[in-house]
Amino acid sequence: MQENTKAIILPENDNDPVAILLYGYIGENENEDFTSTSIVRNIKVLGSRYKNIDIRINSYGGEVYAGLGIFNAIRASRSNINIYIDGVAASMAAVIALCGRPVFMSRYARLMIHPVSGGIQGNAQQIRTYADEVE
């Protein structure tokens, strides 16, 4: 199993949940804290072994498409997945948090959602297409 072991807390017994820590930037570059590949692999592999998974979030977000892969893996999992916002779930991390079944956060934690933003360069048609997608 090749999951990011620094991001996993194994349970003491089979009835306790395994925890996946989503602490840091979400991206696809191997230099990022978490790639969607490693988190999705963890969800799939650990979901086949454990009935209950806790995903604990403390992240300012990251890349949209990397986050959507994680979001879809959580939604597709047959495991009982609880989401805990331990500190902050901002931007793409907030989107991931909102797919929880259920979501828990203390009064001191923060959830930050914002409108889509970004940038593009290209010809007029590419810029129009991008603007339509953002809207």
Image (cartoon, rainbow, N blue to C red):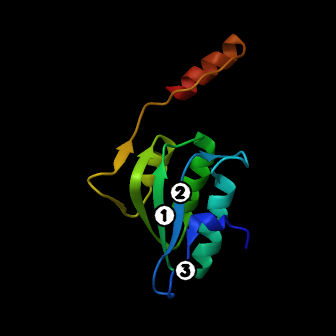
Residue 98 shows in this picture: no
- Give the answer, above or below, for where 92 lies relative to 14: above
In the rendered image, which residue does mark 2 sit on? 22
N-terminal of the pair, mark 1 or mark 3, is 3
> In terms of image quadrants, where is residue 85?
bottom left
Q: Which residue is mark 1?
A: 55
Amino acid, disc 3: Tyr
Which of the two discs, 1 and 2, labels the residue nearer the N terminus? Answer: 2
Where residue 118 sits, quadrant-wise, is top right
Viewer-nearest residue: 97 or 61: 61
Quarter of the image for residue 46 reads bottom right
Which residue is depicted at the point 61% across and 23% down? 130
| 98, 11: nearer the viewer | 11
Q: CA distance from mark 2 to mark 3?
A: 18 Å
* Cα distance in 3D space between marks 1 and 2: 7 Å
Q: Which residue is mark 3?
A: 50
Q: Position of residue 15 (x, y in %)?
A: 46, 86
Which residue is at the far top? 124
Mark 1 burial class by Cα count in 10 Å: few <14, some 14-19, many 20+: many
Q: Name the spot of residue 107 as percent of width and height, x first.
A: 26, 53
Amino acid marked by disc 2? Leu
Quarter of the image that includes the N terminus:
bottom right
Q: Which numbered disc, 2 or 3, marks the residue that appears first in the sequence?
A: 2
